[in-house]
Image (cartoon, grey):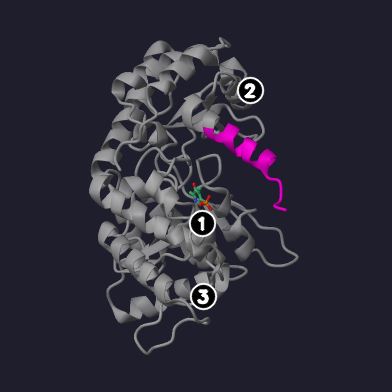
Amino acid sequence: MTIDIHDIEAIIQQQDTWRQTQTINLIASENTPSEAVRRVQTSDFMGRYAEGHPNEGEQVNRYYQGTRYIDQIERMAEQELLKLFHARQADVRPISGNAANTALALSILRGGDTVIANSTDAGGHISHGAVGVFGRRIQNRGQSLKIGGEHSINLHYLPLTEDRYHVDAQKTIELVDQLNPQLVILGKSLFLFPEPVSEIAAFCKTKEIPVLYDGAHVLGLVAGGQFQSPLQEGATWMTGSTHKTFPGPQRGVILSNLEDAAAIKKYWQPADRGVFPGSSSNHHLHTLPALLVATREMQRYGHEYAAQIVRNAQALGRSLDELGTPVEAREFGYTRSHMIAVNVAQWGGGVEVARRLEESDIILNYNMLPGDADPRNPSGLRIGVSEMTRFGMDEHSMAELAQLIHESVRGKNVKSQVNALRARYVEMKYI
Ligand SMILES: *Cc1c(COP(=O)(O)O)cnc(C)c1O
C-alpha cells in the first residue's frame, strides 16, 4: 500500500495555478526559475552528502565516498560563476544568502567587535541588525548590544545623505576612521541605488578593514552588468542569494576577487571555513545542478534580462507617481534596480494596503521606509518586477499594472483585471 498524498498534491496544484497563472507577483526577493532549473532538481543528489571540496585526482578533499559526479557539478558551478562575475574565488556551498552571511560573521567577527551596516529602516537586512547574525556575533554574553548614538559600541549605522536613499560616502569614511570597525557591510534589502563601494573600500583598504557587499537582492543585476560591480570596485567579498534577481534555485554564494596570497589567506580561507564546517555541512546537493543551469541562462541572457528589469522598475515608478500614488526617490528617477518603494501611509499604511492588494491577486510586501520608527506600522510597499519581467512584461504592461495597483491601493477590487493581465504573460523569456 502506498501512502496517500492526494491532499498534499492538491495543495501544491492550487499553489502552482494561483501563483504561476493568476497572481501578479511583485515580491522583490522572489522569482520563478525556468523549467530546466526545476527539472534538474529531482535527482539522486537529493539524498547525498558531499562535505568539503571536490576531490582533485588523487587528492582527497571530501569526507565521504561516492562524490565523483557532484565533484564535477561543483567544480563547473564554481568555474562558470567565476566567469560570470569576473571573480577569482567562489564558494557555491552556502544554502542561502543568510547562510553565506553567517559563514562570514562566524569566521571574521568575535564578541565585542564593531560593525557598520545599513539600519533596518534604511533598508538593511535583518541579518545585519542587532537580532541578526552579525549583531548576535558581536554581542558579548550578558551585555546588551549598543546601537548607533555617540557613545555606542558594536553596531553602527551607515550615514545617509539627506534624501535617505543613498549612503553618504564621506561621512562613512569619517565614521570608519573614528571607529576602526572589524567590518563594513554595504548592500541591503530595500535597495534602489548602487552603494558608494569604490570610495568606502579604498579608504577601508588603507586601514585593512574588510568590506562585505551583500548582493542578495541585486546578484542578477550585477551578473547582467546593470547595477554595479562590487568586487571590481573593491569589496572584499560579495554574498548573494541565487533566487532573487538571479533566477536560480534557493541557494547562496560568496564571491571574491582577491589577487595576492596574503589577502587570500586573510580573507578567503576564513570564509571557506565559515561555510564548512561553519554555516553548512550538507549543502543540499540536488539544487547545485540547478544553480549551474541558471548561471548559464544568465551568461547567455543576463544582460538583456537585467536591462529590461531596470527599465520596467523605472517605468512602473513613473506611471504610479504620475497617477498620484507617491513613489519614493522621484528626484533620482525612482530606482536603478529591480524595485521601487511606494508610500501608502495615507491609505492605511503598508500592512493594510498589502493585504488589500492580495485580495486582487497582486502579491507584494509591506516595508519600512527611511524614517519609519515602528516596524509593525510601516508606511511603505516594496514592489519588485524581476519575476513579471521574466514572463515578458515590458514598459507598456507596467503602465497597465500601475493603473491596477493605483486603484487597488484605494480600495477597489481589481482581481478580474489582474487575472486577465497575468493571463497574457505566462510564457517565460530569457531562457
Ligand atoms: C534576502 C536577503 C538575505 C538573505 O538571503 P536568503 O537567501 O533569504 O537567506 C541577505 N541579505 C539581504 C540584503 C537580503 O535582502
**In screen coordinates, is 141 left or right of 73?**
right
Identified at 62% across, 40% down, the residue is 9
Q: On the image, which quarter does residue 361 sit in?
A: top right
- Please state the horizontal and vertical placement of residue 428, each as a whole percent of the image: 35, 35
Q: On the image, which quarter does residue 282 sit in?
A: bottom right
Task: Check disc 1 and report the residue beneath it.
Answer: 96
Q: Quick check: can you spot residue 393?
A: yes
Task: Check disc 2 and report the residue beneath it.
Answer: 352
The residue lying furthest to the bottom in this view is 58
Magenta extent: 1-16
On whether ligand 1 comes within 8 Å of the CB at mark 1, the answer is yes
Q: Secondary structure at mark 3?
A: loop
Q: Quick check: can you spot residue 207?
A: no
Specify the amino acid type for callout 3. Glu
Q: Is 10 one of the magenta-colored residues?
A: yes
- Please state the horizontal and vertical placement of residue 279, each as a whole percent of the image: 56, 67
